[in-house]
Image (cartoon, rainbow, N blue to C red):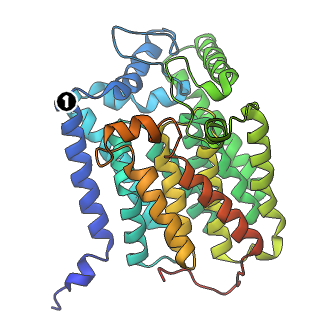
Amino acid sequence: MKKPSLKGIFSSKRTIAIILIIAGIVVGIQSEAVKSFNNYLIFTRAFDHLIHWEDLYGYYPAEHKDLYLYTPGFSIFMAPFEAMPLWLGLICWSLLSCAFFYAAIISLPQLSHSGKLFLFFIVLIEFITCIQNNQTNAIIGSCMVLSFFFLENQKVFWAAFFIVFGSSIKVFGLAAAVLILFYPGKGKFILSMLFWTVFLGILPLLFVPVKQLIWQYTNWIEGILSIHKSMDHGVPHNYHPPLSVMGWLKTWFNVQISGGYFQAAGIVVLMLAFLRTKLYHSLRFRYFVLSSVIIFTVIFNHIAESPTFVIAVFGAAIWFVAEKKNLLTWALLILMLVFTVLSPTDIFPKSIREEYVIPYVLKAVPCILIWFYIQFRIWFGRFSNQEMINDQ
């Protein structure tokens, strides 16, 4: 029997799986040890509030800080974690994010193992930061990528599931639905979206009556609307400028315009890519648009915070491995690794973070630049219908 080479071992799916399993277990243990699991408590306690007919969106300072902002349906998925001992639940919650992230990376079509491994390492630090905060953002970003995989394989029913599931956590996950414009089966896709929306939406009826569920959804909508009314300022406890195009323009150039106008302009620019119908058969072009959609959901989010950027970094990493490399693309990648990925860490002195990185939203700037570069490439780049994507 031929022994696997060292190169084969470290260029395979096994490497990603092993690193993620170790990371998930270590982060889960770390969260319990340092008592850093507030977000996890918000998620798990939501199910308890649901079955006891309590307002999911109220303040519960005796249990945790901050508010539950997700759909009533999402609380059902947290029921198994609520039943677990805290230490085990934290480990399993971290491993769940790892499983989604692993599946998303492995699913990317026509990328070599080494290309996927390189993408993985680009995102890894930001991913670990996300799961250390017990956040859902890695799951949402992974759902967007998995929907792309199923659309590529003309399995619109499951593509719709991942889009609806991701948006049941945070609404912006719904943005991935625009990718259906590339593919046949649009009618079936719409019906599948409706099916999964209704199915996941009424899932709490297993535990509460209709009237109670309607009340919970009313509270959820009111909570979401109150956040959107705050626009550039975020929720009351968020005193930092949003890590977005709006926050960047406000802090760098003192642009005082409602974030809604920027979001509308961003949507127009994003959707213009779909006018290039003759390029729909190019996988590289579809990868660029996928990356554009993923990054868009973060940099045009008026309350974007640091943990959300695992989604943007994932999108930027997909663009980079699909892109033809040159000095500018490498420069953009390095800028992202330095300012988006590393600036919130202890590698940057605290004084620099507090005086420059946070006030000037430096974490967001590289992803903003990459997004605009992707738009340039979408419109002025050359794409071949027969080209293969690799890690060149």
Query: 292 or 345, which is in the foreground?
Result: 345
Instruction: Please identify the quarter of the rendering in which residue 261 is found.
Output: top right
Q: What residue type is labelled 1?
A: Val
In the picture, the quarter occupied by the N terminus is: bottom left
Query: 253 or 114, which is in the foreground?
Result: 253
Q: Give residue 73's position: percent from left, percent from top.
A: 53, 28
Instruction: Label 1: state its secondary structure.
Output: loop
Give the number of callouts. Answer: 1
Residue at figure coordinates x 50%, y 81% from the top left: 390
Query: 114 or 160, which is in the foreground?
Result: 114
Instruction: Please identify the quarter of the rendering in which residue 254 is found.
Output: top right
Vertical placement of residue 286 versus 271, above or below: below
For this orientation, the residue located farthest to the bottom is: 2
Residue at figure coordinates x 30%, y 28% from the top left: 37
Residue picked out by circle 1: 34
Q: Give residue 48's position: percent from left, percent from top.
A: 39, 16
Residue at figure coordinates x 51%, y 46% from the top left: 362
Q: Give residue 8's position: percent from left, percent from top.
A: 26, 82
Vertical placement of residue 323 versus 289, above or below: below
Instruction: Please identify the quarter of the rendering in which residue 233 is found.
Output: top right
Around disc 1, counting alpha carbons within 10 Å, would you say few (fewer than 14), some (14 to 19), or many (20 or more)?
few
Residue 326 seen in the figure? yes
Q: Give residue 215's position: percent from left, percent from top.
A: 62, 12
Query: 373 or 267, which is in the foreground?
Result: 373
In the image: residue 29, left or right of residue 12: left
In the image: residue 270, left or right of residue 202: right
Residue 100 seen in the figure? no
